[in-house]
Amino acid sequence: MPEHNKSITLTPSWKAFFWSYFFGILLLPLLIGFIILWKTRQKHKGIYYEIKDRLITVVESKYSQNIDLKDIRKAEPGEIRFGVGSVTLKTQAREIELIGLENPEGIAKSIEKAVEAELKRLESKRLAKPRESEYDPGSMDRLDYLTGLWQQGLVSEEDFEIERKKFEGS
């Protein structure tokens, strides 16, 4: 079965950094505003979230984290300000916050659905394991071959029964 590597990349809205941009512009005459704007822009550009079929990658500047969908216990939307909000992904070991997303409720619901689908896929894969054979590999072929010899009259009835009982015992 071919693997489909679908992915969606989300970036935070500039509205998530509103106050940093606001104070940077406000302090431009003092020249410190340039530094604030530059640092805010670097931080803004350095954050993105890549959602794939089976994992979410969170990249923040120099650091990145991978979260398997199967490990996510809950995706909660946060408070909305300036039309953007955050989504908190909770796993057993940690919490990751995806900041500055428009429509955080919809994104949280989509992630929850993706987690459900991944868990169902893993469960069906677990249940679809091949069953163990009752016979040794190749023993059924040998029994079929013996039956063919008996039907053709090349093996006597007594010899056939003796050999067949060997297969039932193993």
Image (spheres, grey):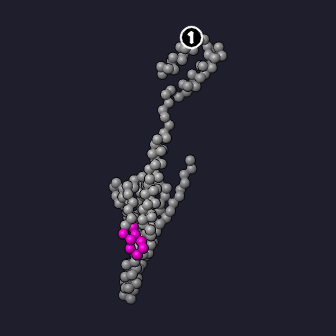
Provide residue 55's location: percent of width, then percent of height.
Answer: 45, 56
Q: Is residue 66 above or below residue 129?
A: below
Instruction: Give residue 28's quadrant in the image.
Output: bottom left
Provide residue 23's location: percent of width, then percent of height.
Answer: 37, 82
- Helix, strand or loop under label 1: helix
Provide residue 92's location: percent of width, then percent of height.
Answer: 34, 54
Residue 158 can be seen in this image: yes
Residue 43 can be seen in this image: no
Residue 3 in the figure: left or right of residue 25? right
Residue 6 in the figure: left or right of residue 64? right
Identify which residue is drawn at 51% across, 20% down. 167
Looking at the picture, tell me which residue is in the foreground, 18 or 114. 114
Provide residue 17's location: percent of width, then percent of height.
Answer: 40, 75
Instruction: Give residue 41's quadrant in the image.
Output: bottom left
Give the amino acid type for the residue marked by disc 1 in the picture. Glu
Tell me which segment is drawn in magenta. 79-86
Residue 94 in the figure: left or right of residue 50? left
Magenta span: chief secondary structure: loop
Identify which residue is drawn at 40% across, 79% down. 21
Mark 1: few/some/many CA within 10 Å (<14, 14-19, 20+) = few
Looking at the picture, tell me which residue is in the foreground, 25 or 151. 151
Q: Is residue 94 above or below residue 40?
A: above
Q: Is residue 114 above or below residue 47?
A: above
Instruction: Give residue 112's quadrant in the image.
Output: bottom left
Magenta stretch containing residue 54, yes or no?
no
Q: Is residue 26 above or below residue 109?
A: below
Identify which residue is drawn at 47% across, 44% down. 124
Q: How many numbered marks appear?
A: 1
Mark 1 = which residue? Answer: 158
Identify which residue is drawn at 45% across, 64% down. 106
Looking at the picture, tell me which residue is in the foreground, 60 or 72. 72
